[in-house]
Amino acid sequence: MKRTLFRTLFFGIVFCSFGFTSKSEPLDKKSSSVQEDVSKYRVVYKGDKGPGVGKNIVFIATDHEYRGEETLPELARILAKRYGFTCTVVFALDEQGNIFPGGSDIKGLEVLDKADLMFVFMRFANFPDDQMQHIDNYLKRGGPVIGLRTSTHAFETKGNAKWEHYGWNYNGSKKEWKDGFGEVVLGETWISHYGTNHKQSSRLVIEESEKGHPIMRGVKDMAVQSGGYTAIPKGEVLVRGQVLNGMTADSKPDSTKELLPVAWVRDYKIDSGKTGRAFATTHGASEDILNEGFRRMLINSTFWAMGMEKDIKPDSNIDFVGPYKPTTFNFDGYKAGVKPADLAGWDSLIMPGEVVKKKK
């Protein structure tokens, strides 16, 4: 009787300790299910040779207009294939698990916990608390950051009690966070367009005093499709933009517009955290990286941000990896029905799908 009772108690304790009941899944199955769910939000490109082997870059892509969901995976493929980095691109998704530009349903940002660089192309995001925590942790440890275009107004978190201070126009009690992530980390928030977007493109001019900066090695003849932003950044200005009266590189300059900063570097520090490097540019639309000079500047900036200046070569290979056919940037339409997995590998098309109107 005692032995029977003992065996009953013993096996009851063992089964409880491992979490088995007649109605629950084994823990390893649950863990696998969670991992599978997270993997739906990302695509990973892993290089195997070059100075970046062993280093991790995390890209976060969710903007409404400039097709950051195309720019970032192509840059990630170049950095992985040409230089050996492991590049993880995380997207916001819709209810069907398709990439949803400008959305805030995102998972898997725990990859930032071991990241060597956070590279963002975002606009007005309001991520779940647990995902924001990974971003906050990363910034507090002073991880390097690169932000393109609308990342100056990456977050719209008004009313979010925990993360409201990240918002692009924050003006609350945390005075050191005025104007949010854009101002505090990148050095500038959203102000206004400078010129007529979609009708006036930009020629980019390197500051004479910055031609020797590591990020500028081999960079020349920069011209981009995206229009100018008004920017008065807190940082070391590397490049200024000349607004053009047209959408081609040979369009005449707009004589009514002065040259404003379009790319800069700075050191940032949030709260009592460590100091980190940041590079920001007010350009970066999907068609902008067709320009070799601009693309080289972005690739160079990743090395600089991680303190790898010695690996920046003026003639390093920045050729596209796989087919890249960017969508002309616009606010209402994007390539729909595309899952992150559709962008896997070196040879997948960026971006597949058909352009459709985004639901309001």
Image (spheres, grey):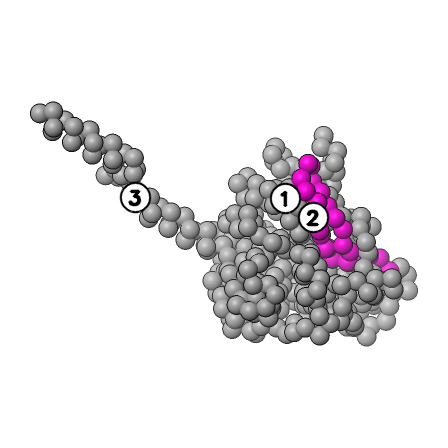
Q: Is residue 7 visible?
A: yes
Earlier in the chain: of badge 3 and badge 1, it is: 3
User: Residue 141 has which mark?
Assistant: 1
Q: Is residue 153 visible?
A: no
Q: Give the range drawn in magenta.
A: 259-281
Expressed as whole percent of the image width and height from the top left, the position of residue 216 reads 77, 65
Which secondary structure class fits the magenta region best? strand
Residue at the spot 42% in from the left edge and 51% down from the top edge: 35
What residue is shown with label 2? Answer: 276
Relative to 318, say whether 167 is above or below: above
* Amino acid at pointer 1: Arg
Q: Does 321 appear in magenta?
A: no
Q: Which part of the image, by quadrant, shows the N terminus? A: top left
The residue nearer to you, when weighing 107 against 336, is 107
Expressed as whole percent of the image width and height from the top left, the position of residue 143 reads 64, 49
What residue is shown with label 3? Answer: 25
Earlier in the chain: of badge 2 and badge 3, it is: 3
